[in-house]
Image (cartoon, helix red, strand yellow):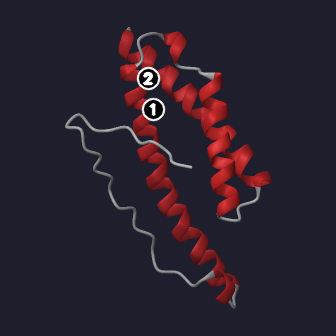
Amino acid sequence: MFWSAPLSADGLHHPQIVAVDARVDPAACRSMVEVRQGVDALDRALVALLAERQRYMDAAARIKPDRGAVHDDARIEDVVAKVLASAEAHHLSPAIAEPVWRTLIDRSIAHEFSVYDRTRS
């Protein structure tokens, strides 16, 4: 399953590399300090990725022709299906993946509505 990525104005996608701080592999952790350091490192990387995702929502708000296009049930279900397939491949529990992404999508739509309204008034 392939996920498409929007292209930049010049026709090329130039993603930034998200660095993840050094950490002990979870299977090798021997202390809660190592566990917490690993979680904290991943959280910092996730924040960077979520910030980039938010910038795509900003772009969507700029590009969509009308406010009614901001919420798209078919797209929501498509995203969730892709996430669940990826979650399975990476051994992420669907009980974690689905509610996390549905909340992320819900908050992203609210953000997109806010940006849409702010840039159109």
**Element assignment for label 1:** helix
Dot 1 amino acid type: Met
Dot 2 falls on a residue whose secondary structure is: helix
On screen, residue 4 versus residue 62, left or right, reads: right
Towards the viewer: 46 or 97: 97
Q: Is residue 106 visible?
A: no
Q: Is residue 93 above or below residue 99?
A: below
Name the one closer to the observer, 60 or 81. 81
Asked if 117 appears above or below 52 in the picture, the reply is above
Disc marking residue 14: none
For marks 1 and 2, the one nearer the N-term is 1
At 36% from the left and 16% from the top, the residue drawn is 119
Task: Specify the amino acid type for callout 2.
Answer: Val
Q: Position of residue 79 (x, y in %)?
A: 61, 38
- Alpha carbons under labels 1 and 2: distance apart: 9 Å
Left or right: where 114 falls relative to 95: left
Specify few, some or many for label 2: CA neighbours under 10 Å numbering under 14, 14-19, or 20 or more.
some
What residue do we see at 52% from left, 70% from top? 41
Residue 59 in percent (x, y) is at 37, 29
**Where 29 sits versus 54, above or below?**
below
Q: Kindly identify which residue carries mark 1.
A: 57
What residue is shown with label 2?
A: 115
Are discs 1 and 2 less than 8 Å apart at CB? Answer: yes
Looking at the rendering, in which quadrant would you find the C terminus?
Answer: top left
Residue at left offset 74%, top offset 44%: 99
Q: Residue furthest left?
A: 10
